[in-house]
Image (spheres, rainbow, N blue to C red):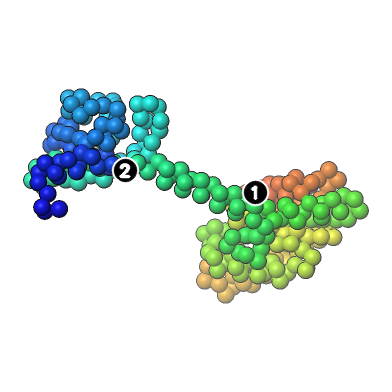
């Protein structure tokens, strides 16, 4: 690079695919390369006459490192900006713009796909032994149908632990407690809000309430030796004749929200 002449260096900068803009200490545009002129749809001589406050260029001359730029043709682009101060000209700077629109679009598509896959997963991402909310719904569908057909009891318990002590270790201990205190036919899961969900087959609402009292007693004993005690609240509901898997779960989650506002910490949905 040291062997380049001034003319060769200027030509190299001008034909670079990376949009470049030079501003003086007064903020005025001193020059730009072809890529920048194409980006803004103006020729270099027109740009040289524009002031920093011009509406067209104002977004490109700010301090943001990621710029949402609407091109002259109406196309929206995302530009990453890198600014370099010019040592021998105090206040002057060279600004380099990289179009990252496609990169951000691919990242957004990846994140959306990841969320979709997580939403369709049957098991919780952090506690793999528990069902996800989607897994609970899938499992509930035949259980609700069976309950309605044979008039057999089916209850749902929801449980929320205090977020101030909601560490991964605490959640794992609670998950183990729930698996230990439920039967093999019962289901244990959690939703996106990290609330635990218990599906209790052949269990009336009164029996579910007894289980909640047992869980609360176990939790109290666990807290006796715990450095960070865990507080919990519960919601309880029983399957009704007009229920489907979504309605019974939503009612249980609504009961939990009510319980968290209730001093007793438990709400039973009728």
Measuring 29% from the left and 27% from the top, which residue is drawn there? 41
**Which of the 4 image quarters holds residue 139?**
bottom right
Expressed as whole percent of the image width and height from the top left, the position of residue 106 reads 47, 46
* Above-or-below relation of 223 to 246: below
Expressed as whole percent of the image width and height from the top left, the position of residue 241 reads 86, 45
User: Which of the two residues, 224 or 248, is positioned nearer the viewer here?
Assistant: 248
Measuring 38% from the left and 26% from the top, which residue is drawn there? 73
* Above-or-below relation of 104 to 76: below
Q: Are there few (<14), some (14-19), or many (20+) residues within 10 Å of tag 2?
A: some
| Disc 1, SS | helix
Q: Are there few (<14), some (14-19), or many (20+) residues within 10 Å of tag 1?
A: many
Measuring 64% from the left and 56% from the top, which residue is drawn there? 121
Q: Are marks 2 and 1 in contact (CB under 8 Å)?
A: no
**Which of the 4 image quarters holds residue 124?**
bottom right
| Disc 2, SS | strand
Mark sitting on residue 257: 1
Expressed as whole percent of the image width and height from the top left, the position of residue 200 reads 78, 60
Q: Is residue 52 left or right of residue 266?
A: left
Which residue matches tag 2?
98
Expressed as whole percent of the image width and height from the top left, the position of residue 171 reads 59, 65
Q: Is residue 240 left or right of residue 192?
A: right
Q: Earlier in the sequence, mark 2 or mark 1?
A: 2
Mark 2 and mark 1: Cα distance apart in space: 47 Å
């Amino acid at each position: 690079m040291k062997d380049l002449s001034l003319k060769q260096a200027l030509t190299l900068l001008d034909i670079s695919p990376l949009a470049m803009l030079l501003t003086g200490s007064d903020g005025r545009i001193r020059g730009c390369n072809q890529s920048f002129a194409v980006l803004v749809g103006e020729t270099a001589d027109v740009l040289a006459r524009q002031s920093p406050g011009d509406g067209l260029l104002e977004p490109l001359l700010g301090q943001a490192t990621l710029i949402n730029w609407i091109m002259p043709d109406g196309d929206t682009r995302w530009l990453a900006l890198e600014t370099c101060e010019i040592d021998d000209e105090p206040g002057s700077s060279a600004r380099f713009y990289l179009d990252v629109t496609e990169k951000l679009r691919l990242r957004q598509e990846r994140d959306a796909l990841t969320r979709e896959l997580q939403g369709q997963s049957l098991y919780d991402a952090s506690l793999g032994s528990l069902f996800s909310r989607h897994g609970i719904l899938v499992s509930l569908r035949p259980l609700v149908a069976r309950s309605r057909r044979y008039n057999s009891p089916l209850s749902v318990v929801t449980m929320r632990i205090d977020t101030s002590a909601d560490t991964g270790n605490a959640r794992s201990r609670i998950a183990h407690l729930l698996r230990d205190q439920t039967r093999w036919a019962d289901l244990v899961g959690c939703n996106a809000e990290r609330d635990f969900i218990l599906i209790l087959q052949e269990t009336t609402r009164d029996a579910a309430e007894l289980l909640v009292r047992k869980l609360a007693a176990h939790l109290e004993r666990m807290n006796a030796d715990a450095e960070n005690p865990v507080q919990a609240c519960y919601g309880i509901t029983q399957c009704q004749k007009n229920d489907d898997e979504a309605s019974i779960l939503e009612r249980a989650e609504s009961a939990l929200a009510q319980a968290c506002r209730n001093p007793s910490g438990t709400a039973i949905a009728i």
